[in-house]
Image: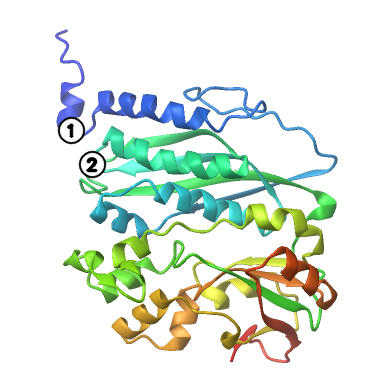
Amino acid sequence: MKSRGNEAYVLAGVDIKAADKAKELIKQHARSTFSPEVLTDIGLFGGMFEFKGYGEPVLVSSTDGVGTKVKIASLLDKHDTVGIDLVNHCVNDILACGATPLFFLDYIAMGKLVPKRVESIVSGVAKACRSVGCALIGGETAEMPGVYKVGDYDLVGFIVGAVEKRNIINGNSISLNDTILGLPSSGLHTNGYSLVRQTFKIDKDPSPLQVFYPELGRTLGEELLEPHRCYYSELKPILPMIKGLAHVTGGGFIGNLPRILPQGLAAHLDKNTWHVPPIFNLIQEQGGIEETEMYHVFNMGIGMAVICSPQHVAKLTAALPEAKVIGKLIKTPKSQKIIIT
């Protein structure tokens, strides 16, 4: 039988050689996150992590993506920050349960595999993993012509962490008159980008991304690619004083705070207690969006809500200089769980 190498597969839109090159470029970044607990190199059929150091361990897992923020990255041809977004989002999610990140896996799917682009994405993943001591032990890079257009890609992450059973944070101890603190976001994080793209008509004409806005101090594109903030390092030492954590992501306050509130209690937030970054005002004005919807879609400047007893407020705000008291827990006979005034 006459061999044509990978010619037929290349004609079908899949380049195995490009995939192999991408994997070699990825390895150096992944290895930079390895700890002694990692027992395998990149490339085996499964990643192995030696789990130890816990008495009654509870594994906490989460998966998420960067959403259509990758469209902005593609239009600006800047791909080294979306990996940071991905890891930080996932770390914050398991942190809300009190968990320490152990290891991470990523999934990158592209219309046409470009090794240098893959390396740029994974460099951001590895950077964020190193910052929280999380090992990047594996992943998948898929070339999928016909599913994604050339230049398009999707990025998904999977994280596993652990927490001692006695230290789980699930909101069960939250009670009437507890205080809500807010930690500032670094911008949109990874949510609301479909609305932003529609508001500025970016898909039809990406030129608005290059417009400099004095109130932002940079271009719209630079603002939109600001990485999702990670709260792990600052919150980890003070978790024993915290009753509940809500990572304010898709759905804003309305979609996330109720996830940790006991029956019969609602969060009363005072929107005048924190500074709303100018990017949100710009989006609202440009799109003629009602304020209620803004708070239902975006984080509006608060990336993590922290619930604690009133007696712990002074210690927590001392440990978290950027934190603001933004509300408290009230009793409500209604089904409404969030009240913003």
Type of residue at label 2? Pro
Q: Helix or strand or loop: what does disc 1 sit on?
A: loop
Type of residue at label 1? Ala
Q: Residue at x 36, y 49 (%)?
A: 154
For residue 14, which quarter of the picture?
A: top left
Residue 126, given in percent of the width and then of the height, sits at: 49, 39
Screen quadrant of the C terminus:
bottom right
Left or right, 260 with respect to 74, comes to: right
Left or right, 20 with respect to 151, comes to: right
Residue 179, disc = none
Q: Is residue 338 above or below residue 122?
A: below
Q: Is residue 80 above or below residue 14?
A: below
For residue 287, which quarter of the picture?
A: bottom left
Question: Are the residues at dot 1 and dot 2 in contact (C-beta closer than 8 Å)?
Answer: yes
Q: Which residue is mark 2?
A: 145
Q: Helix or strand or loop: what does disc 2 sit on?
A: loop
